[in-house]
Image (tube, rainbow, N blue to C red):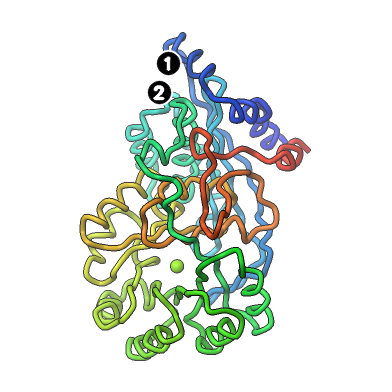
Amino acid sequence: MKQNRRQFIKTSALAAAALTAPNISATTAAKKQPLLYKKMKLSWTSYNLQLRHVFTISGFSRKTTPVVLTKIEFDGLEGYGEASLPPYLGETQESVIDFLKKVDLSGFHDPTHLEEILEYVDHIAPGNTAAKASVDIALHDLAGKIIGSPWYKMYGLDKMKVPDTTFTIGIDTDEIIREKTKEALGRFNILKVKVGGPDDKRVIETIRSVTDLPLTVDANQGWKDKYYALDMIHWMKEQGVVMVEQPMAKDDYEGNAWITENSPLPVFADESVQRLHDIERVKGAFSGINIKLMKCTGMREAWKMRHLAQALGMKVMIGCMTETSCAISAAAQLSSGLDFADLDGALLIANDCFDGAKLENGKIIVADLPGIGVKLTQKAIRFFNE
Ligand code: MG
């Protein structure tokens, strides 16, 4: 582990310096030598995120989230990436590292050829979406640094025109729900409530005893009966809920479609949609989709999903796992103009090791740095060197 960390961090001080100054000198240097002679080097390290609160969604509770941080070095520049691995998604630090060991970037000489490189990465093995995202994000970060631009600019987006991010309240005791809600006051303009448990009304009423902020709810497939679910949605609308995520089981197309058709609120697919090819299948069953980098293999596919969903007349939200500011910043680069953003993942952890996108007036706003807009914190540089 220590050796890994040292390798990971070896040139981080240099990279931090390169990030604070424009990358013009590095870009100029890159132009002097043909790219053909330069090679990309991928490295990684495991890291465990400590959650500020025990996190409970329908069916699971936990206090930590394992991640794997990646780095791609090329011509004096470094791109950072991350795989976040909440246990219910099936990937582990071991499976990510096994995948990363198979990634051979030696055949590629220009990191800005994202389509070609990421097509290769996607075909190494099926699944492994978070592992693939960790390569995708690091490559986007690196490519942006080579080009000298943050990705939101290359996407043609206004970084300030992003939706308010939701702040997630898990299923918990009344006391903790009240405490978490109070923690959100003055910082967030909308809250996301995990429902789908036996006592959803109590959870909503507890939050309502503290604030009138608009709410979104995420049932995480927890509702088992469509009539019950629709009754809950009608009741929740009266309580100021504005959107519902994944009411029924991910493969219950009919149940979810019936709810969407009858619901007074927009209904978004999360677990029902992982990747680009899933969108066509859920068209008609949901009002919108929740795109997450960890399930769709990263920024490249997320960007395509956004456009396909919108072309099909669906709404789009961008979500996250508990992640450091690395993966959050990557997602935030493409959040402008979307219907909802749920990008509080880095705010839920106590040991973020990146500086990046920040909460400003209830929105997650990216830093004006090339790439995904992150640098390792000084504390993290010390940690990885120990
Ligand atoms: Mg969800």
Residue sitting at x 32%, y 53%: 306
Mark identifier at residue 35: 1
Task: Name the amino acid type tagged 2.
Answer: Asp
Q: Earlier in the sequence, mark 2 or mark 1?
A: 1
Q: Report the quarter where the N terminus lies.
A: top right
Q: Nearer the viewer, residue 184 or 169?
A: 184
Q: Position of residue 357 (x, y in %)?
A: 55, 47
Mark identifier at residue 254: none
Pointer 1 local density, CA inside 10 Å: few below 14, some 14–19, many at least 20:
some
The residue that mark 2 highlights is: 110
Q: Nearer the viewer, residue 87 or 335?
A: 335
Residue sitting at x 54%, y 60%: 362
| Quadrant of ligand 1 in image | bottom left
Say above or below: 231 vs 363: below
Question: Is residue 141 in sight in this rendering?
Answer: yes
Q: Position of residue 76 (x, y in %)?
A: 57, 21
Residue sitting at x 49%, y 61%: 165
Say above or below: 322 vs 175: above
Q: Secondary structure at mark 1?
A: helix
